[in-house]
Image (cartoon, rainbow, N blue to C red):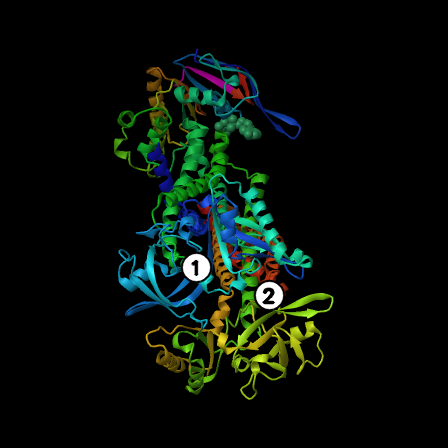
């Protein structure tokens, strides 16, 4: 078992009303799964993904990641888990505009203990693998959206995470670019990486092995 | 990691040049300020600290009450104290006297001549103080009446060498008091190398005080005489406080024998002050230590730190204001796995790095400003790469970097990644308030500086232009030295005949600050009146343009002027004399009052005009004063020099204008005025830089709002006013804070003067208007440009 969410609730207080963003979420994810999260806009998909990715906290329930109870871990410990096992891919890419493609991909390694030659080798592999060696010295703004997302994925993969979380990774791309990204995900998944993606498209969801549907912060049966 | 952060840092600079420049200029001027003041303070603190046994060196001082009940702290003592102490107190290792001898001696060997100032010192002077002696030690110098110690400077001038001089002969010729007391040949017993030493005791040569003892009337060897400064080296381990109380008891016992019982309360108390403290803690008020030069050391240190703080505030304000620009960066880094520590280190690293760059720039600024700074402060500070300076600079820089960087670092790194990625940063009330508060602080300080500059320069102006009761313009003074001493009458006669010379006289001491006191005037049942007086020649009153109220001035037309006296108005008033002219009074003997002069300021305007009199005693004069015709200064001075050289061939003619001499009374005020001018300029410059940066940012942040407002038809001017208003408010609040504080501070400074300006409302108005206008102008350049932009541009850029 990679991770397990039990009766997760998340809410915000507005005035004296409590607005639930997530209600009674129960999910089990095994290593090697490819899961799609779907649901209408505002249903809580991003919120859920952020909770899984430990970018956001929750108010009630249990979250075990590799048998570790996340809710009772110290921040430092949580960051270590996160650094080691999770990679994030965003709809808006979120690359650093001031850094080149090479530097962007290299960045996660800087927060871990890698020698500079190891880093060089790892980044080189990534560039090769995504066929963007020629673009390594360009800045993100000089790339197309699809290329930017490739860089985003390369950056997420560089530290060989067990789990990739992708929030509408193809949302800003045309269908051909989107397809390429999804193929890439499928390939990664076959290599053993667990993937959880948020998507609006049935076609993209079909790449996954299972779909979780959300409505108003609640899971609905498929 | 480091490389990465460095890259980010550099690329951010390139992207946001104005922010970078504001920070760089602000921090480097702030640091330059602190460095300059550091150099100055260090120099001040090092004075007299070079003596090997500094902690055992003391000077003997006395607190003596005067007739009005005030306690005066006096540094001169009876010379009897020295042998007495050596005999009575075994804990005194050495004691030595020091007396001013002549500040205008002429030292010569055969053909070479140089002017210099000398003192008389006790034989153990060099056993107490560690002035480095060349080829001699403290036990060898100043033994015997013809022994002299000269400075290396004099040695080089006279002999072209500083070694191998023991036993050589130099001649000390004249001094201007007309008695040539210690003129004669002396044999060099040591050469002292004072180079690179900062000492409050300065001399070109030292003679032994035995000369004084030998010539002095034995009748004057009394415990209640004074005239020598006494320095001590106590034995290691002596309890100075305990010793001081025994010394005082001993001293009082001696004086109680001399003084009749009813005067015993005038004896006062003897106490010790550590020698190296004397320089900075030289002011005593009513017998109690009341600061001194240390006040300026503290004042300027505080001011420099405040200016640096203002620069740090800019950095803090700009970095937090622009946090939104970096939100994404923070968010991404957190998502990728950066810990809070990583981020804090990065941002603090950035600010430290920026301050290090600023430090380099600051050093360049210091190098450029040092000559001017030395001029203002009358120092000879060099920028030498000594480890102390470098470590101090680095510590200051690191602290600055930490202070400026820590707030933004903790602020940014504390944000939640989810929020930062949404790039929706709500400025919290507290944060907004802090930023405003910091701006208010900056401007309050700036306005206080401006008020101080106005008040100080007004007061100095007042001091310079105040009617002193005499005319200090176009009066040249110089020493009555060399052959002028014996031939003063002939010289003055010829002088008066020279073209361009309107009048000439001779006098004792300085015109603008004479401080001879004496001649108590006894009154029934009341303390006697103490006077200040001057010994003068004919034409004194006329040359200086002092106004006579009644009677006449000293004149050749009457005989026996030596038994006459001229008093000032205050004296007559205090003495309560009616119809004073012709009356005989007992002031330094029986004297006939021949004239009354209107009050004039014979001392700095810190002092009130007190009872004062003039005596006709040309033999005691040591200075010539010449009134010259306006507009013909150059040729007249050339004539003066020629005449001077006729009497004193070979001596340099060194003269001074009386108004310069007068101005010199206010050197330290002028210094404060100059420095506070610079400080005010810096403070407002740095504050405005910060405001500029904030305005740039605000305009950027509100670009869309401006666009929408314009699209909805709001006028450009209205928008400009709206935007500027955001920045006017803090400045207005600063005015409210700064005006009362500025009033208190300047009022306090002025209270030291007996004659001073009234603080007027317009000073504050002016300071406020200057701050407001400068601030509005700074902000305006940004807001108006934004307001007049086409709305489409603003909207499109979003
Ligand atoms: N911090 C917050 N405070 C209040 N409400 C929030 C907060 N964060 C999210 N929400 C609300 O929670 C709901 C779920 O948001 P979320 O971003 O997870 O939706 P989503 O499913 O990802 O939508 P989309 O498909 O548009 O991306 C929305 O109604 C949103 O307005
Ligand atoms: Mg979403």
- Kindly report the distance in space between the C-alpha atoms of the residues bearing marks 2 and 1: 37 Å
Residue B294 seen in the current view = no
How would you rate the neighbour count of disc 1 (Cα within 10 Å): few for under 14, some for 14-19, many for 20 or more? some
Q: Which residues are magenta?
A: A206-213
Residue closest to the eye, B764 or B104? B104
- The correct choice, above or below, for B767 with respect to A14 in the image is below
What x and y, as percent, mark residue B407?
A: 50, 38
Labels 2 and 1 in the same subunit: yes
State which quadrant residue B395 falls in: top left
Label 2 resides on the chain identified as B
- The correct choice, above or below, for B420 with respect to B638 in the image is above
Residue B751 seen in the current view = yes
Q: Secondary structure at mark 2?
A: loop
Labels 2 & 1 near each other (Cβ < 8 A): no
Camera-side mark, 2 or 1: 1
Q: Is tag 2's residue or tag 1's residue first in the polypeptide sequence?
A: 1
What x and y, as percent, mark residue B757?
A: 61, 66
What x and y, as percent, mark residue B367?
A: 36, 54
Q: Which residue is mark 2?
A: B607
Q: Which residue is mark 1?
A: B210
* Residue found at the very far right of the displayed protein: B525
Residue closest to the eye, B702 or B11? B11
Label 1 resides on the chain identified as B
State which quadrant residue B655 falls in: bottom left
How would you rate the neighbour count of disc 2 (Cα within 10 Å): few for under 14, some for 14-19, many for 20 or more? few
Confirm whether the magenta stretch covers residue B674: no
Disc 2 residue: CB within 8 Å of ligand 1: no
Disc 1 residue: CB within 8 Å of ligand 1: no
Residue closest to the eye, B468 or B203? B203
What x and y, as percent, mark residue B156?
A: 29, 61
């Amino acid at each position: 078992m990679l991770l397990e969410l039990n009766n997760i609730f998340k809410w915000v207080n507005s005035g004296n009303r409590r607005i639930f963003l997530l209600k009674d979420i129960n999910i089990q994810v095994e290593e090697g799964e490819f899961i799609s999260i779907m649901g209408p806009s505002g249903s809580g998909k991003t919120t859920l993904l952020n909770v899984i990715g430990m970018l956001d906290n929750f108010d009630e329930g249990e979250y075990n990641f590799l048998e570790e109870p996340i809710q009772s871990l110290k921040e430092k410990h949580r960051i270590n888990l996160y650094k080691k096992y999770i990679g994030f891919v965003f709809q808006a890419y979120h690359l650093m505009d001031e850094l080149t493609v090479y530097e962007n991909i290299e960045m996660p390694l800087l927060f871990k203990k890698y020698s500079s030659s190891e880093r060089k080798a790892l980044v080189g592999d990534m560039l090769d693998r995504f066929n963007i060696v020629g673009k390594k010295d360009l800045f993100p703004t000089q790339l197309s959206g699809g290329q930017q997302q490739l860089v985003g994925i390369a950056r997420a993969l560089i530290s060989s995470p067990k789990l990739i979380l992708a929030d509408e990774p193809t949302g800003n791309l045309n269908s051909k670019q989107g397809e390429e990204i999804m193929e890439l995900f499928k390939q990664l998944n076959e290599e053993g990486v667990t993937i959880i993606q948020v998507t609006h498209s049935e076609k993209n969801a079909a790449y996954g092995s299972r779909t979780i549907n959300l409505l108003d912060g609640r899971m609905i049966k498929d | 990691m480091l490389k990465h952060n460095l890259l980010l840092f550099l690329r951010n600079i390139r992207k946001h040049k104005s922010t970078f420049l504001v920070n760089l200029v602000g921090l480097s001027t702030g640091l330059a300020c602190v460095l300059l003041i550091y150099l100055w303070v260090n120099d001040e603190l090092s004075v007299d600290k070079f003596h090997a046994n500094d902690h055992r060196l003391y000077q003997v001082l006395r607190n003596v009450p005067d007739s009005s009940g005030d306690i005066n702290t006096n540094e001169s003592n009876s010379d009897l104290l020295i042998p007495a102490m050596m005999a009575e107190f075994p804990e005194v290792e050495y004691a030595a006297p020091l007396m001013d001898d002549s500040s205008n001696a002429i030292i010569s060997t055969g053909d070479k001549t140089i002017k210099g100032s000398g003192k008389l010192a006790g034989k153990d002077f060099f056993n107490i103080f560690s002035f480095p002696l060349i080829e001699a030690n403290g036990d060898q110098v100043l033994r015997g009446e013809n022994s002299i110690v000269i400075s290396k400077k004099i040695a080089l001038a006279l002999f072209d060498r500083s070694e191998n001089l023991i036993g050589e002969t130099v001649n000390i010729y004249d001094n201007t008091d007309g008695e040539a007391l210690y003129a004669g040949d002396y044999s060099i017993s040591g050469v002292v190398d004072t180079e690179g030493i900062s000492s409050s005791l300065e001399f070109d040569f030292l003679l032994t005080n035995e000369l004084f003892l030998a010539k002095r009337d034995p009748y004057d060897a009394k415990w209640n005489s004074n005239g020598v400064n006494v320095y001590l080296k106590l034995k290691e381990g002596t309890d100075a406080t305990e010793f001081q109380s025994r010394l005082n008891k001993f001293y009082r016992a001696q004086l109680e024998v001399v003084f009749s019982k009813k005067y015993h309360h005038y004896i006062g108390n003897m106490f010790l002050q550590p020698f190296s403290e004397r320089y900075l803690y030289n002011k005593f008020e009513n017998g109690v230590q009341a600061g001194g030069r240390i006040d300026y050391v503290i004042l300027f240190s505080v001011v420099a730190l405040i200016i640096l703080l203002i620069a740090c505030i800019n950095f803090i304000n700009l970095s937090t204001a622009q946090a939104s620009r970096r939100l994404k960066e923070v968010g991404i880094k957190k998502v990728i796995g950066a810990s809070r520590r990583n981020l804090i280190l990065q941002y603090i690293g950035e600010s430290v790095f920026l301050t290090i760059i600023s430090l380099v720039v600051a050093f360049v600024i210091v190098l450029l400003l040092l000559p001017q700074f030395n001029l203002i402060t009358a120092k000879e500070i060099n920028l030498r790469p000594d480890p102390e300076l470098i470590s101090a600079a680095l510590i200051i820089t690191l602290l600055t970097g930490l202070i400026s960087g820590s707030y933004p670092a903790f602020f940014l790194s504390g944000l939640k990644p989810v929020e930062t990625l949404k790039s929706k940063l709500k400025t919290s009330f507290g944060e907004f308030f802090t930023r405003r508060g910091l701006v208010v602080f900056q401007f309050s300080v700036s306005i206080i500086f401006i008020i101080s500059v106005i008040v100080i320069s007004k007061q100095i102006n007042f001091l310079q232009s105040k009617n002193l009761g005499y005319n200090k313009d176009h009066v040249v003074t110089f020493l009555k030295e060399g052959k002028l001493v014996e031939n003063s009458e002939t010289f003055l006669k010829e002088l008066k005949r020279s073209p361009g010379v309107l009048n000439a006289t001779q006098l004792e001491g300085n015109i603008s600050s004479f401080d001879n006191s004496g001649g108590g005037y006894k009154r029934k049942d009341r303390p006697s009146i103490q006077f200040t007086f001057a010994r003068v020649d004919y034409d004194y009153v006329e040359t200086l343009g002092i106004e006579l109220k009644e009677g006449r001035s000293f004149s050749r037309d009457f005989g026996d002027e030596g038994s006459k006296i001229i008093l000032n108005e205050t004296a007559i008033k205090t003495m309560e004399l009616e119809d004073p002219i012709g009356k005989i009074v007992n002031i330094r003997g029986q004297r006939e009052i021949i004239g009354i002069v209107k009050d004039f300021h014979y001392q700095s305007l810190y002092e009130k005009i007190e009872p004062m009199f003039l005596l006709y005693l040309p033999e005691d004069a040591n200075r010539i004063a010449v009134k010259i015709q306006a507009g013909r200064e150059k040729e007249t001075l050339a004539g003066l020099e020629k005449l001077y050289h006729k009497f004193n061939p070979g001596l340099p003619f060194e003269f001074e204008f009386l108004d310069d001499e007068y101005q010199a009374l206010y050197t330290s005020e002028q210094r404060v005025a100059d420095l506070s001018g610079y400080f005010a300029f810096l403070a407002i410059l740095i504050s405005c830089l910060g405001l500029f940066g904030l305005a740039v940012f605000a305009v950027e942040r509100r670009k869309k709002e401006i666009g929408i407002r314009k699209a909805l038809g709001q006028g450009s001017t209205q928008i400009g006013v709206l935007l500027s208003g955001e920045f006017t408010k803090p400045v207005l609040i600063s005015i409210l804070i700064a005006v009362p504080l500025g009033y208190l501070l300047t009022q306090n400074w002025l209270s030291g003067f007996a004659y001073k300006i009234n603080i007027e409302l317009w000073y504050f108005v002016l300071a406020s208007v200057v701050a407001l206008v400068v601030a509005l102008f700074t902000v305006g350049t940004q807001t108006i440009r934004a307001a007049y932009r086409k709305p489409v541009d603003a909207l499109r850029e979003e």
